[in-house]
Amino acid sequence: MRLDVVTIFPEYLEPLNVSLVGKARARGQLDVHVHDLRDWTYDRHNTVDDTPYGGGPGMVMKTEPWGEALDAALADGYESGAHGPVMVVPTPSGRPFTQELAVELSERPWLIFTPARYEGIDRRVMDEYATRMPVYEVSIGDYVLAGGEAAVLVVTEAVARLLPGVLGNAESHRDDSFAPGEMANLLEGPVYTKPPRWRGREIPEVLLSGHHGKIARWRRDEAFRRTARGLPPHRAEPPRPDRALRGLRLRQEGPRDPEHPGLETVRRRPILAQAGGRGRIGGCCVLAYAPATGGSSSAG
Ligand code: J9T
C-alpha cells in the first residue's frame, strides 16, 4: 500500500517510523511519502491560509498550494506504478472512523491524506479531487483537534495492522472488538497472562481447564457481558443486530432512531457534528444489549 501525507508539519508524522507501521515500512509493505505543503508556496512567508469569504473567525487553507501538492503527489505515485488513489480528509465533520471503514481503506492500494490546520481546507479542493478519485472525509471522534495530523496517525495505525502480513499472526485481528464476523458488534472480553496469582487476584479457572470449547464459550459470554455494560462512548452509530446477537434484545429509553426503527435508544449523548455520517447534530442514539429474558431496565 502507498500512503501520501501532505502537511505543514512533516515532523508530526515521525511516529510513522516507529513500531508496527515503522516495521511495515521497513519490510516494504507500506510505502510512505510525507510532503511539506509549504514546498508549493511561492511568497516570502510561505502562506498556506487566508481569511474566510463571508467573514468569521479563523483562517482557511488556500486552494493553490493544496492543488499543486496533490498534483505532484499523484504524478509521483502514478510514475512509480501506484494506482487507485483515495483521498482521506480528516475532519470533525466527516464520517465516523470505524473498524468497518478501516477494513475498507485497508483494501485500497493508495491513500492520500490531507490533514488540515486552521478552519479547514477551501471546499473546492475536495470537490475538485472528488472528480478524479473517491474522497473520504473522516472523523476519529466527537472532538476538535488543532490539526488533522494526529487523525492521520490513528487511521494509519488502524489500517496498517489489517494489511496482509503486517501482524505476526494472521488470526490476531479476527477477535478484535468491532471486527466483522463472529465478534461484530461485540467488545473484546478481558485477557490474562502469567502469573496465575497476583496480589491475591486469581485468573478465571476456566482458562486453566485446557477445554477449548469451554474457553471459547466463556470468551463469548464475557464479550456479551462487556457489551451489555454499555457501548464505548465513541460508537455513535447504532450496531446492527446480527448472528452474534441472537438471544439478546435491545432495550429502550428515549426516542427511536428513524434510520434504525427496530433498534431502541438507551442513552443519548451530544455529538459535535456528523453532517456526512449517520448521527444527528445535537444528539444520537447509543444502544445497549440486554438478555432476551431480562426486564426492561437500562443496561447503560
Ligand atoms: C483538524 O482536524 C480535526 O480537528 C479532526 C480530524 C479528524 N477527526 C476529528 N474528530 C477531528
Image: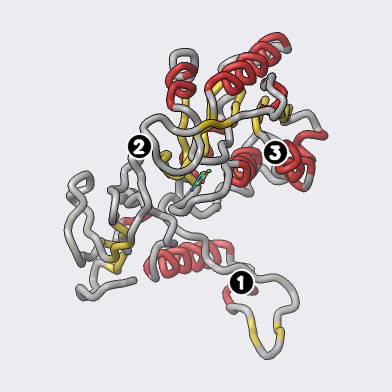
Residues under labels 3 and 1: Cα distance?
47 Å
In the image, residue 149 above or below residue 230: above
User: Residue 147: horizontal and vertical position, in percent?
Assistant: 58, 44
- SS at mark 3 in the image: loop
Q: Quadrant of the N terminus?
A: top right
Q: Is residue 142 visible?
A: yes
Name the residue rendered at 43%, 26% in the picture.
Answer: 123
User: Does 195 appear above or below 248?
Assistant: below
Residue shown at 70% from the left, 43% from the top: 167
Q: Is residue 290 above or below residue 15?
A: below
Comparing 22 with 243, the one in front is 22
Q: Which residue bears the numbered disc 1?
A: 207
Instruction: Mark 1 and ligand 1: say if the CB distance to the nearest ligand atom is below 8 Å.
Output: no
Q: How would you rate the neighbour count of disc 3 (Cα within 10 Å): few for under 14, some for 14-19, many for 20 or more?
A: some
| Mark number displayed over residue 9 | 3
Toward which corner of the image does residue 32 lie, by quadrant?
top right
Q: Are marks 1 and 2 in contact (CB under 8 Å)?
A: no
Query: Which mark sits nearer the N-terminus, 1 or 2?
Result: 1
Badge nearest the viewer, 1 or 2: 2
Three-letter amino acid code at disc 2? Gly
Count of marks placed on residues: 3
Amino acid of disc 1? Leu
Residue 276 shows which numbered tag? 2
